[in-house]
Amino acid sequence: MPEHAFHNPDFLWRNPDPKPSYDVIVVGGGLHGLATGYYLAKNHGIANVAVVERAWLGSGNAVRNTTIIRSNYLRDESAALYEHSLKLWETLAEALDYDLLFDQRGVLQLHHSQADVRSGTRLVHALRLNGIDAEWLDTESVKEFCPLINTSQDIRYPVVGAFLQRRGGIARHDAVVFALARAANRLGVDLIQDCQVTGFEKAGDRVTGIVTSKGRIGAGRIGLVGAGRTPLLAAMAGFPVPIQSSPLQALVSEIVDQVLNCVVMSSGVHVYLSQAHKGELVMGAGRDGYTSYAQRGSFHIIEQQVADALQLFPLFGRIHLLRTWAGIVDVAPDASPIIGPTPVENLFLNCGWGTGGFKATPGSGWVFADTLANGRPHPLVVPFGLDRFERGDLLDEHGAAAVAH
Ligand code: FAD
Ligand code: PYC
């Protein structure tokens, strides 16, 4: 039985002073930064690594997200990357020796019109051709799979079918932060908190170190994994990124008995719901439509998503709202991540996971560690480079981003 975060007295790692230099510095102690540090040490034997974090580990989107995991992306390039990640999730708890509450309870994406049905069934076929599990359910099967959904055909947006990925599900985000941090730290990676990067040191076009609130730290290679602040970090390094940073909100209800057996998403009605292991209903919808770094959003988004949720689940009408919050997500114009080299030598970028990066945590860390270790993009991320915007070779995944866009 893997250990659980809260029963484990040694989950608190040291917060060391930085060494004068490291082989690799990872900027950003969220899930992707921690996973990168972990895989650098585990897969590549590179442990002279620091993960530097401006606040506390996981204080960004890592612990603000709604933990939906799935790999149902349309494009071959994306499907390969997200499926690589889903496969890693399937053995991650064992690898980290930690209970991540990873639960493949199924992700159901509801469709409400004939146009929706066409795109949903197209996705099923595309995924199957890529060897990824995907099913199409008619309305009756939707009711069978998730009895709480209102499948009456008399409502404004009746459910006419649904996409189902049974291997999709949820995990516990804070446990993933703890587990990755502990595993990376045990392999020798320094995790340095309260260490804000304020600039980069360069020799010509080559980066040689970072300037931080804890002083200058030298580095062979540097990886930027600072979701929510990527444009600021890139500007410090002297190049632009096509990223918009905006708030994405979510909310939880009071704790209730376990009633919702799967994850339910609907881009037509524009809301998604699941139930945490603790019992709260977890709910979210689209991004707020403006740039912000404030980690809070507008009330009308919450009001709208609650109204939308009640169309699908009238039964939840008496449940109280407990808590709302927001994270700042970095979104690229094609809603796909940007991973690979930058115009600055030895400086690499991993950003743009937008509203969907939780599910990518192990896959992203795996491919970015490989990229940093070898100084060239991992084969799976070659199409995801910053240079795709110069070539006009975009990877449009707005559809797969589903509700959260
Ligand atoms: P973060 O945890 O944000 O890590 C970035 C870190 O970089 C932060 O800790 C930050 O403090 C640090 N940093 C920034 N600038 C500096 C600096 N100058 N110096 C040092 N450190 C710095 N994805 C899914 O797949 N499924 C979901 O259900 C889902 N739901 C979401 C719901 C919400 C409300 C939100 C906000 C996001 C959701 N996401 C979801 C998206 C997911 O959370 C993100 O894509 C993912 O967490 C980003 O990777 P990360 O964990 O490394 O980011
Ligand atoms: O990527 O599945 C997702 C997601 C759901 C809510 C936010 N992101």
Image (cartoon, rainbow, N blue to C red):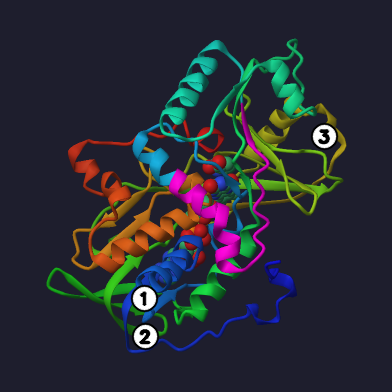
Q: Which mark is residue 316?
A: 3
**Mark closer to the chain start, 1 or 3:** 1
Could you tell me which quadrant the N terminus lies in?
bottom right
- As helix, strand or loop, the secondary structure at mark 3 comes to helix
Looking at the rendered image, the disc whose residue lies closer to the viewer, 2 or 1, is 1
Give yes or no for residue 88 being in the magenta stretch. Answer: yes
Q: Position of residue 98 (x, y in %)?
A: 64, 67
Q: Position of residue 250 (x, y in %)?
A: 64, 46
Distance of label 2 from label 3 (alpha carbons): 52 Å
- As helix, strand or loop, the secondary structure at mark 1 comes to loop
Dot 2, crowdedness within 10 Å: few (<14), some or many (≥20)?
A: some
**Mark closer to the chain start, 2 or 1:** 1
Residue 168 visible from this viewpoint: yes
Distance of label 1 from label 3 (alpha carbons): 50 Å
Q: Which residues are magenta?
A: 83-109
**Mark closer to the chain start, 2 or 3:** 2
